[in-house]
Amino acid sequence: MGIGAWGSFFDKLISKLPIQNRIERWKNQLVDLKKQREELLKGDCDDKKAMRLRDINNRIDKLNELLKNKAQD
């Protein structure tokens, strides 16, 4: 087996692996964060939940901005 054959083998192997690209990862994070936010909003509010909700909203805003910028490319 030559070097070219190994490269072809690894290309085929990698194409079959379920590796997410950056955009898919952002979209999945967005879905997960929205689910977390909905769960937090169902219960009673306290300081810990409020801080987590703030962090989730900030991350959602950032992901939306990243996806919007990527769509403009």
Image (spheres, rainbow, N blue to C red):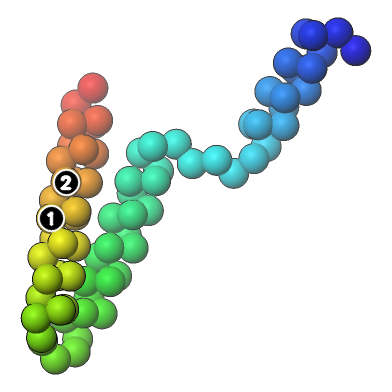
The one nearer the camera, 45 or 8, is 45
Residue 16 vs residue 1: left or right? left
Please, what is the three-letter code of the amino acid marked with disc 2? Lys
Identify the residue position indicated by label 1 in the image: 58
Classed neighbour count for the residue bearing mark 2: other residues with Cα under 10 Å, few (<14), some (14–19), many (≥20):
some
Q: Is residue 54 above or below residue 58?
A: below
Residues at marks 2 and 1, CA–CA distance in whole angstroms = 6 Å
In the rendered structure, find residue 47 and report the number of the disc placed on it. Answer: none
What residue lies at 28% left-to-right and 55% top-to-bottom? 30
Identify the residue position indicated by label 2 in the image: 62
Residue 43 in the image, given as x and y percentages of width and height: 19, 89
What residue lies at 15% left-to-right and 79% top-to-bottom? 48
Q: Evaluate if marks 2 and 1 touch, with contact meaning CB atoms under 8 Å apart.
A: yes
What residue lies at 33% left-to-right and 63% top-to-bottom? 32
Local secondary structure at mark 1: helix
Quadrant where the N terminus is found in the figure: top right
Quadrant where the C terminus is found in the figure: top left
Q: Residue furthest front?
A: 48
Residue 2 vs residue 15: left or right? right
Please, what is the three-letter code of the amino acid marked with disc 1? Asn
Residue 69 in the image, given as x and y percentages of width and height: 18, 31
Local secondary structure at mark 2: helix
Classed neighbour count for the residue bearing mark 1: other residues with Cα under 10 Å, few (<14), some (14–19), many (≥20):
few
Q: Is residue 50 above or below residue 13?
A: below
